[in-house]
Amino acid sequence: MNPLDSDLRKTALIIGANGVIGRNLIDHLAALPDWDIIGVSRRGGLDTSRVRYIAADLLDPSESRRKLGGLAEVTHIFYAAYQDRPTWAELVAPNLAMLVHAVEAVEPAAQRLRHISLMQGYKVYGAHLGPFKTPARETDANHMPPEFNIAQQDYLEEKQSGKSWTWSALRPSVVCGYALGNPMNLAMVIAIYASMSKELGIPLRFPGKPGAYHSLLEMTDAGLLARATVWAATEPRCANQAFNITNGDLFRWNELWPKIASSFDLDTAPPLPMSLLMAMQDKEPLWNRMVEKYGLEPNSYASVSSWAFGDFVFSWDYDFFADSTKSRRAGFLEFMDTEAMFMDIFADLRHRRIIP
């Protein structure tokens, strides 16, 4: 690196580097010439010419300080880590602790820190609890706690007071993209479910609640979200604000589902409500046979299935969408056709030999 460029270069610390959001953010930043990239996750990763990985358990404050406390070069923290727990209340403590431990470790050393980006979601609006006000807007009032997204933002707002760095919060809908071993990966749920349906010679049935087949909802492409995240982190007009980030279109499963089935050369049949988590419990032997039969990458069944998340999304028998005009008014004008997004992801999964 030319020392004369040191003030222009930026160093991104991406926390949650192996998730669908973090992975796509790394890919986007790696295509930009003025970014250096450090990825953090529990598993770490293989270093490349553009990305250095750190394995760290952010639930452990001492390990966080030991692994991250020397990163003086960091200019931007992108926080996209998540730990799942059985109940909404139990999500708060670990997810808040990971953010706090990361920031408390990095901020004292990173004298050039400019921005902290927080990844949120529609849980801020209570979307996970039941029917909520749509379109949801960033100005909507908070709901009754507990809610870890809100707790994290409260922490950042308080921490930022009097500091030179700023923060932003990105609020996507369901994020779709490539990632393995992710507990919230709807595109993978659909791809594995459809592939198994085809292998078993049965039509592709929508497995969710009856009302969910007809509700109005939206998605967020992981690549689009990555570009929006970097935009918000580097655009002064976005300082200390939250932004809904969506593909920009709305759909109903009753229109999209037959098109998804067709892309797998499958027929459809009337929806049949069922728990994927229960129905797919015995399918590991089937998956292993498919891996061998079609010469797929030897990914474990656990790493390609997110059935509980599929059940969660397919249970939304109410409208699920937000107003994303605030980001457009501030200058982010990109959009994505949701049908094309799904088809591109399925094609990518075939190219990677994840599915037949």
Image (cartoon, helix red, strand yellow):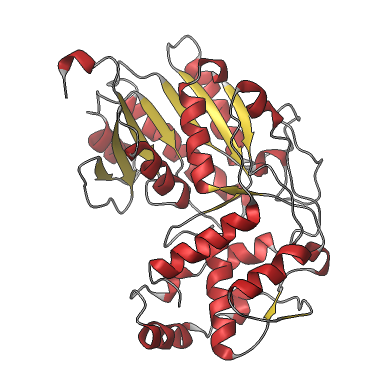
Indicate whether 13 appears above or below 57. Answer: above
Q: Position of residue 245 (x, y in %)?
A: 61, 37
Q: Is residue 322 left or right of residue 88?
A: right
Indicate whether 21 appears above or below 160. Answer: below
Q: Residue at the spot x=37%, y=42% of the render?
A: 26
Q: Position of residue 229 (x, y in %)?
A: 50, 33
Which residue is at the far left? 2
Q: Position of residue 323 (x, y in %)?
A: 73, 35
Indicate whether 14 appears above or below 20. Answer: above
Q: Residue at the spot x=51%, y=15% of the render?
A: 236
Q: Is residue 82 left or right of residue 109?
A: right
Q: Is residue 112 left or right of residue 16?
A: left
Visible residue check, residue 119? yes
The quadrant in which residue 299 appears is bottom left
Residue nearest the observer in this picture, 2 or 144: 2
Visible residue check, residue 59? no
Quadrant of the drawing holding the C terminus: bottom left
Q: Position of residue 248 (x, y in %)?
A: 68, 42
The quadrant in which residue 52 appears is top left
Residue nearest the observer in this picture, 36 or 143: 36
Residue nearest the observer in this picture, 160 or 326: 326
Q: Residue at the spot x=54%, y=33% of the render?
A: 152
Quadrant of the drawing holding the N terminus: top left
Indicate whether 74 appears above or below 133. Answer: above
The quadrant in which residue 204 appears is bottom right
Q: How many marks?
A: 0
